[in-house]
Amino acid sequence: MKILITGAAGFVGSYAVEAFAAKGYAVHAAILPQETLSPELLPLCTVHHFDLLDTASVSALLQQIQPDRILHLAAQSSVAAAWKQPQLTADLNIKGTVNLLEAARNLPALPRILLIGSAEEYGKLPSDAEGTQLVSESAPLHPVNIYAATKAAAEQLAGVYAAAYGLPVICVRAFNHFGPKQREIFVAADFCKQAAEIELGLREPVIRTGNLDARRDFTDVRDIVRAYVLLLESGRAGETYNVGSGKAIPISEMLDMILSCCRVPVRREIDPAKLRPAETAYLAAGTTKLQSDTGWRPEIPTGQTIADTLDFWRQKLKEQSEA
Ligand code: GDD
């Protein structure tokens, strides 16, 4: 069974290459021309360079590989970055998805596709649901930021391709995930990196944060990728699935948990540059459909993911300072 993973050089992509290779798939990893795959992944896959925005390049790649499955991860995945690069975000997340869907529907045998969208597509929940309820896939979508709007558009496009061409697409709305190797543009990685820098004496003992009031549903990236494997195997084509833990915590609580693992005392300070023009207040995943179709449950406790992420940054910064 051949799987094409786009965005394989990214955070989730690197875990996905390992997970699908471990399941016996022939993994084809699509990455940008300027990217490299980390050395430990190279024996697990065949690497292809491609440009998601170049229609001909995407089509040639799919024709060459003729994959049975596609995991489409390549995207501009940061809500914060999308405010600063709206055009690039729209290009990658919408045009890039169309390039992929169009190339896929022209293959002789239609591949099963897992399209990774976002919990952010829900955006503003009805006020009675906010802060209390798990959001189910049937909830209306009210994106409140540019990233979320592009992900909602990509999902709508997938629905059109599925209905018009019979393309077997499964959509995911992924809730927040974190773990070792994530870039520090995301909140848990950012806090863990700052904490590790403080421990190593590389910065003053002050953690700079954005809005600590938003509530998010955090899952370990390894659990998330396990859900993606299960969905490609036994998810229903044409369906959309939430993937998350089902428990929302305030960002302030995530910070408390990280600081409780930090070996030195730390102060906190709001950095106005980290506040966003608009913010989704609350997101918690209702995962009844995912659980009944695949049996998936999150397994790795948040405390373990925090410990692993902190260790990753301690090690990385130590290596950098010794180099
Ligand atoms: N990045 C960051 N840095 N976020 C902070 C900080 C900070 O110092 N302080 C507070 N926050 C808040 C943000 O304002 C947001 O409410 C929350 O922490 C999470 O921010 P991010 O980790 O940047 O992720 P996100 O929620 O915007 O988006 C992530 O989750 C989506 C699913 O809900 C990404 O992984 C998306 O790709 C994903 O779709």
Image (cartoon, rainbow, N blue to C red):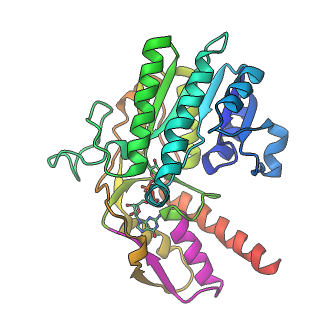
Q: What residue is at 40 percent from the left and 71 percent from the top? A: 210
**The magenta stretch spans which residues?**
189-212
Q: What residue is at 52 percent from the left and 88 percent from the top? A: 205
Q: What residue is at 42 percent from the left and 45 percent from the top? A: 245
Quadrant containing ligand 1 reads bottom left
Q: Position of residue 287 (x, y in %)?
A: 37, 35
Residue 26 is left or right of residue 206, and the answer is: right
Name the quadrant of the N terminus.
Answer: top right
In reply to whether residue 321 is colored magenta, the answer given is no
* Residue closer to the observer: 177 or 52: 52
**Would residue 283 be seen by someone viewing this image from the given angle?**
yes
- Up the image or down, 44 lies above or below 111; here it is below
- Residue 113 position by quadrant: top right
Q: Position of residue 214 (x, y in %)?
A: 32, 61
- Residue 253 position by quadrant: bottom left
Q: What residue is at 18 percent from the left and 45 percent from the top? A: 126
Q: Residue furthest left?
A: 128
Q: Position of residue 239 (x, y in %)?
A: 41, 23
* Residue closer to the observer: 184 or 304: 184
Name the quadrant of the C terminus.
Answer: bottom right
- Up the image or down, 46 lies above or below 120; here it is above
- Residue 281 position by quadrant: bottom left
**Would residue 237 be seen by someone viewing this image from the given angle?**
no
Residue 300 is left or right of residue 25, and the answer is: left
Q: Position of residue 296 (x, y in %)?
A: 48, 33
- Up the image or down, 316 lies above or below 19; here it is below
Image label count = 0
